[in-house]
Image: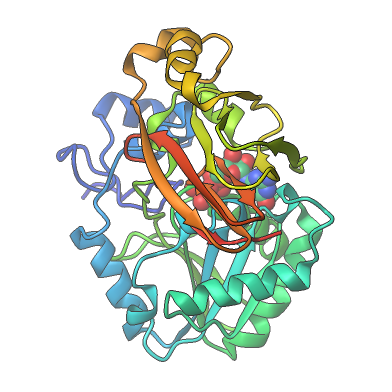
Amino acid sequence: MEEELYCIGCGAKIQTDHPNELGYTPQSALEKGLENGEVYCQRCFRLRHYNEIQDVSLTDDDFLRLLNELGKADALIVNVVDIFDFNGSLIPGLHRFVGDNPVLLVGNKVDLLPKSLKRGRLTQWMRERAHEEGLRPVDILLTSARKPHEMEELLAKIEEYREGRDVYVVGVTNVGKSTLINQIIKQTAGVQDLITTSQFPGTTLDKIEIPLDDGHYLFDTPGIIHRHQMAHYLGKKDLKIIAPHKEIKPKVYQLNEGQTLFLGGLARFDFIQGERASFVAYVSNDIEPHRTKLEKADAFYEKHVGGLLQPPRPDEVPDFPELVRFEFSIKEKTDIVFAGLGWVTVSKPAVVAGWAPKGVDVLTRKALV
Ligand code: GDP
């Protein structure tokens, strides 16, 4: 019998027969992978090398299978979310599946948010948002998977709440779950950077098992893809630009009604009606905002997208989705969130519009800062 192989990215069982199913790898890629000792399924390979995400339906059988297993297990569920893209990283309906199992909510990438933001305030904000989703976490922790020392607190919390049980780590793709798991492995098992299948063979559910010292396991589950993230609509270079790498420096604009702010060519914010006020943009430091008159904004975009307004780059403009408009009437301090890109904080009552590439959500939430 052939030896069973598992993707070192997501833990799916590698197969070469069904391109649309979990774990698919073309035969040639499999052979290459075996030579290098790194076998990825095509989905993870593309995600890693091209930042290209293959879409998987949120309601597909594997996802339901995963969620159902969470409910049946007697375990601590660690739900990793990206604090910079909180709405884009929630798992819809998670609370219905976890059963009586405690959930530890982990807000990753905290290094991206302005340091002036108090951690206590941030966790309180996360708690309120989680409650709105019906999720009642036993605890909320902020972390940065890029900083090894932050893992100690996470591991201590996991120990505290797992009470001798298994642990399931769940999260949508791109929240930094792999980075986090790799850090955990380094600190617990001392293995550097690689989740190898020989050490942690997957199981029926294509999850990765990391042994804990009392005979229990920490399971890394496959990332679930969230369709409305900006990441699905951009090329690799642009993704590098929109994904912030460093602490975000908020940019403040005094705007009068009838003014528009472009966030590169990716998104647009219109101040339609209201008193002159300050608006704060929280986006990657590499995205340059441009201010213009609302009445000229359509023509301005048409003329400058791919040029003055980048990303997208010029060669990507033909395939770049059109911007779609969402209008909001704001009563109190509110963030207009462009899923995966960032947000603009509106502090006074106003009528505004947010525009994002077709398919990407624009939504409002109680202001984070
Ligand atoms: P996964 O799909 O959830 O497994 O996510 P990855 O671990 O592949 O991480 C997705 C992206 O986020 C990568 O570019 C990581 O370098 C980045 N990332 C992960 N953790 C952190 C973090 O704590 N801070 C920052 N700034 N970036 C992170």
Pick the front one: 331 or 201: 331
Q: What's the residue at 66%, 24% (across, down)?
A: 288
Image quadrant in which you'd find residue 240: top right
Q: Is residue 242 left or right of residue 149?
A: left
Along the line of sight, the residue nearer the viewer: 338 or 336: 336
Can residue 177 be seen from the camera position used here?
yes
- Image vertical order of residue 136 relative to residue 359, above or below: below
> How far from the left and from the top, in percent, is residue 25?
28, 35
Q: Residue at x 58, y 86 (%)?
A: 138
Taking 263 as reference, is 37 left or right? Answer: left
Residue 130 x %, y %? 51, 74
Q: How is the image coloured?
A: rainbow
Quarter containing the C terminus = bottom right
Above or below, 77 relative to 267: below
Tell me where residue 309 appears, x and y as whole percent: 55, 17
Q: Position of residue 157 (x, y in %)?
A: 69, 79
Name the residue at 59% across, 37% down: 257
Towards the viewer: 270 or 185: 270
Whether residue 193 is visible to the viewer of this picture, yes or no, is no
In the rendered structure, the answer to whether residue 319 lies left or right of residue 271 reads left
**Which residue is rendered at x = 71% and y = 32% of the image?**
285
* Residue found at the far right of this picture: 116
Q: How many marks?
A: 0
Q: Please state which of residues 14 and 235 is positioned toward the viewer in this rendering.
A: 235
